[in-house]
């Protein structure tokens, strides 16, 4: 069969849809139609007699299998089908298909219109069936405007609660409910504290407007962290921390592992400066979980995954393979740790280790030699009255 043709029509939640003549013609000539169940209810009056309707549900592989017999399919989607929409799915799954687009305003555009809000600088994020990662990144970066597509789990109340947990009270929230539906539409602006208690009509979206700038430090004094039993010697000192992060070249990395995180200072500093970075942190002591929770909330770094237990006994197969690793603690098993890292580290990965003794330095060189890598940089640094630390980088 020749390539499939997809006519993708963007619609709103309006009960009395306006469909331009070109769109009406596509519908009148169609025989196979598809969309969400909500879309079906909205467009049912416009569909020709005797046509086929295919619900878009998971798993999507079943949906595409049902598409296969038809050369032309008319698909209804919300707003702009290219804006976190189904057109992107078709492009990915059927790259050779012929896509013909008939877009409408997306819901965040409609909400900005209701607010009379210029939105050219807005950072748009979808939480519809997606993780928090992009939203957390926008928060940490302190974006002036953040537009958010929600779902039934990541609701406005859940979003407001997460923001307050991590100290981002410097935004107000405007929620748009059932935009385009004359009977159900509502737009309201709330403080985050008030938004925690709302239960808006679905579907909804929201826009966050920054009301003040939250500090985003570069180099956090160790005295500012919650410490393990108050011991300042158990934390990577700020100059050492910043130099270590510099040697990891995190701007060009996707997945960062912090092994032996203790207070979480290296993970937190990395997340603050590189919000898109996926940070996975390992610590043997159970107290580490509480410290990471306290410190990540204090410094506004949601999204750090903290794993408690012996790293050598931890199943790491479910975590994104790292392309940068910092070793902050090793319990005398540095060679074994390096050998385990070797099984998962990306080919161009970097390892940085802070050596506090000649013995640990020799162990690092031995482990690096056994894994076929080499030490490319070594910087010796003394901070105040503490013993000198040698920062070693291997590739």
Image (cartoon, rainbow, N blue to C red):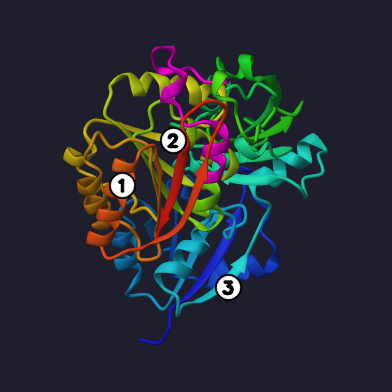
Residue name at image x 55 percent, y 14 percent: 197
Give the mark, 1 or 2, whose residue is nearer the N terminus.
2
Q: In which quarter of the image is residue 175?
A: top right
- Give the alpha-carbon distance from disc 3 to disc 2, as whole Å: 41 Å
Q: In which quarter of the image is residue 126?
A: top right
For the C terminus, the image quarter is: bottom left
Which region is colored magenta?
224-244
Residue name at image x 83 percent, y 38 percent: 116
Q: Does any portion of residue 344 appear in the rendered image?
A: no
Q: How crowded is mark 2: few (under 14 residues within 10 Å), some or many (20 or more)?
A: some
Q: Mark 2 points at which residue?
A: 304
Q: Name the residue under label 1.
A: 319
From this viewpoint, which residue is outermost toward the left? Answer: 313
Give the mark, 1 or 3, whose residue is nearer the N terminus.
3
Label 3's element? strand
**Front label number (1 vs 3):** 1
- Looking at this view, is 20 or 293 the one in front? 293
Q: In this view, does 178 lie above or below 162?
A: below
Place of residue 315 in the rendered image (x, y in percent of width and height, measured from the top left): 19, 43
Asked if residue 347 lies left or right of residue 158, the reply is left
Place of residue 363 in the rendered image (x, y in percent of width and height, measured from the top left): 27, 47
């Amino acid at each position: 069969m020749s390539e499939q043709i997809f006519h993708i029509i963007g619609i709103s939640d309006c009960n009395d849809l306006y469909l331009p003549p070109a769109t009406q013609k596509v519908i009148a000539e169609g025989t196979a139609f598809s969309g969400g169940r909500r879309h079906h209810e909205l467009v049912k009056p416009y569909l020709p007699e005797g046509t086929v309707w295919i619900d878009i549900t998971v798993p999507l592989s079943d949906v595409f299998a049902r598409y296969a017999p038809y050369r032309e399919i008319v698909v209804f989607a919300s707003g702009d089908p290219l804006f976190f929409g189904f057109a992107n799915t078709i492009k990915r799954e059927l790259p050779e298909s012929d896509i013909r687009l008939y877009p409408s305003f997306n819901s965040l555009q409609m909400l900005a219109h209701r607010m009379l809000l210029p939105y050219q600088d807005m950072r748009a994020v979808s939480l519809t069936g997606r993780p928090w990662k992009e939203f957390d990144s926008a928060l940490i970066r302190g974006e002036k405007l953040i537009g958010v597509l929600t779902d039934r789990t990541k609701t406005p109340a859940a979003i407001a609660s997460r923001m307050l947990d991590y100290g981002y009270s410097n935004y107000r929230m405007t929620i748009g409910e059932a935009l385009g539906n004359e009977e159900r539409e509502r737009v309201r602006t709330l403080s985050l504290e008030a938004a925690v208690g709302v239960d808006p009509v679905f579907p909804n979206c929201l826009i966050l407007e920054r009301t003040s700038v939250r500090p985003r430090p570069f180099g956090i004094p160790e005295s500012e962290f919650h410490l393990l039993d108050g011991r300042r010697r158990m934390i990577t000192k700020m100059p050492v921390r910043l130099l270590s992060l510099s040697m990891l070249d995190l701007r060009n990395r996707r997945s960062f592992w912090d092994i032996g995180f203790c207070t979480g200072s290296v993970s937190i500093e990395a997340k603050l400066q590189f919000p898109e970075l996926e940070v996975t942190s390992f610590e043997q002591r159970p107290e580490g979980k509480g410290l990471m929770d306290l410190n990540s909330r204090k410094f506004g770094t949601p999204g750090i995954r903290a794993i408690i237990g012996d790293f050598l006994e931890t199943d790491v197969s479910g975590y994104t393979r790292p392309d940068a690793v910092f070793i902050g603690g090793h319990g005398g098993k540095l060679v074994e740790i390096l050998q385990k890292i070797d099984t998962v580290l990306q080919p161009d990965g970097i390892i940085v280790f802070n050596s506090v003794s000649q013995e640990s330095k020799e162990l690092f060189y031995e482990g690096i030699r056994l894994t076929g890598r080499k030490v490319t940089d070594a910087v010796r640094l003394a901070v105040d009255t503490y013993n000198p630390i040698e920062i070693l980088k291997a590739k």
